Amino acid sequence: MQRVIPIQAGGRPMSDETSALSQERVLAITSSSQWPRNLDHEIEAIAAAGLSRKATYEGFRAVAVRMQSAIEPNSACEGRGCSACCHISVAMSDVEAEVLGAKLGASPRRKVAQERREDVVDEWFGVPCTFLRQGACSIYDSRPIACVLNHSLGPDPSMCSTDIAPDESCVPRMNLIGFWVQYNAALRPKGWGDIRRFFPREVVATMPKRRA
C-alpha cells in the first residue's frame, strides 16, 4: 500500500498552514496505538483467506473501523451531529449494498451500479442521504466504509459545508487508495453506486424502525 498522505478533495488548493496541519495529523494518526501496525499484511491476509464475499467485506470493514478509531480524534469532524458529509455522494459496492440491506431488513435496488468506484460522480452534492434523521445518521453502526473512513484533516469542519461549491472547497483527507485497491481486488464487485440509488426513500420506507 502506498504511503498514507493527505490528499485534497475540492477545487481550492490547500494553504501552507492547512497542508502542514494535515501532515501533522496524518503522523499522529499513523503513530496512534489504534492504527493497524501491519495494515498491508492484514488486508492481504483477508483477501487471501478464501472467505465468502460477505465475510471478506466484513473483514475489510473491521479494519476500516480500527483505522477510523485512530483518524477521528485527529480530525476536524465533530462526531455524529456533524452531517455535512451526509450531503455528498457516498460510493458503495453492490457487495456492501447487499450486506447492508440484510442488516437493515431491506433489499437494495438492483441494476443501479456503475463499473468503477471512480464513476460514482458527485451528482448528489447537497442532497441529504436517505438515512439521515434530524442531523444524525440512523444507521451509524452499520454505515458504509466510505463514511467510516471519511474525515477532514483541516483546521475545522467549515470547508465541508455544501454551501461552498466543490470548486471553492478544500477538504484534506487521508489518502487511502491502497485500501480501496485491495478491497476491489478481493471482492471483485460487479459495480458501484451511490447509497441513494441502492436505498432510495421508497426502499428505506420499508425498513423496520431504527433508533439513530
Image (tube, rainbow, N blue to C red):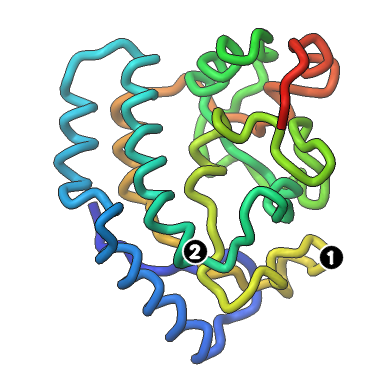
Separation (CA) of disc 1 from disc 2: 19 Å
Q: CB atoms at circles 1 and 2 under 8 Å apart? A: no
- Establish if 139 lies above or below 51: below
Name the amino acid type tagged 2. Arg
Q: Circle 2 — which element? A: strand
- Could you tell me which residue is drawn at 38 percent across and 24 percent down? 57
Q: Residue at x 72, y 21 (%)?
A: 210
User: Which residue has dot 2 on it?
Assistant: 173
Q: Which mark is residue 113?
A: none
Residue with the mark numbered 1: 163
Quarter of the figure with the C terminus: top right
Quarter occupied by residue 211: top right
Q: Secondary structure at mark 1?
A: loop
Residue 134: quarter of image: top right
208 to the left or right of 13: right
Q: Position of residue 17 (x, y in %)?
A: 51, 90
> What percent of the width, then of the height, locates residue 150?
53, 52
Mark before the other along the chain sequence, 1 or 2: 1
**Residue placed at 35% from the left, 44% from the top?**
66
